Image: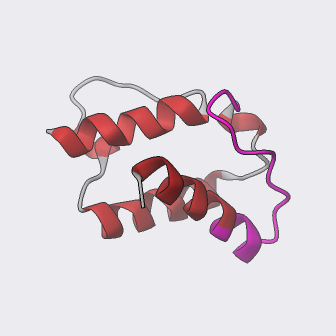
Amino acid sequence: MNLQAMIFEQFEQVAREQDKKLGKLAPGMVLLEAGLDSLCFAIIVARLEDNLGVDPFTMSEDVFFPVTLGEFVKFYEDAAIT
């Protein structure tokens, strides 16, 4: 499974578990308009760290918060390379 598919799957799973209505997943989707709250994002980040062994939010020296789902995926792709 590629990284984008894994991330999309986590978004969908957490939305179901937290009873949230998730917007249509696409790279241009604005994260704040996804239908998820901060707890959902924390769960997603924690699960991705468990699965990938990387948390780009703690690894990054620059303060960067992805705005779109595509930026979120790229953030993880870049962290997985280093």
Front-most of 23 and 55?
Answer: 23
Q: Main secondary structure of the magenta part?
A: loop
Residue drawn at 40 percent across, 61 percent down: 48
* Residue 49 spot, x, y in % from top left: 33, 61
Front-most of 34 and 57?
Answer: 34
* Residue 13 spot, x, y in % from top left: 65, 70
Hey, which residue is sitting farthest front in the picture?
1
Front-most of 32 and 26?
Answer: 26
Quadrant of the rendering where the N terminus is positioned: bottom left
**Does 65 appear above or below 8?**
above
Residue drawn at 46 percent across, 39 percent down: 73
Left or right: 23 in relation to 79: right
Hey, which residue is sitting farthest left in the picture?
82
**Would you identify the image quadrant in which residue 26 lies?**
top right
Residue drawn at 41 percent across, 53 percent down: 2
Residue drawn at 81 percent across, 46 percent down: 23
Left or right: 3 in relation to 67: left
**Does 30 appear above or below 11?**
above
Q: Which region is colored magenta?
A: 13-29
**Does 34 appear above or below 75?**
below
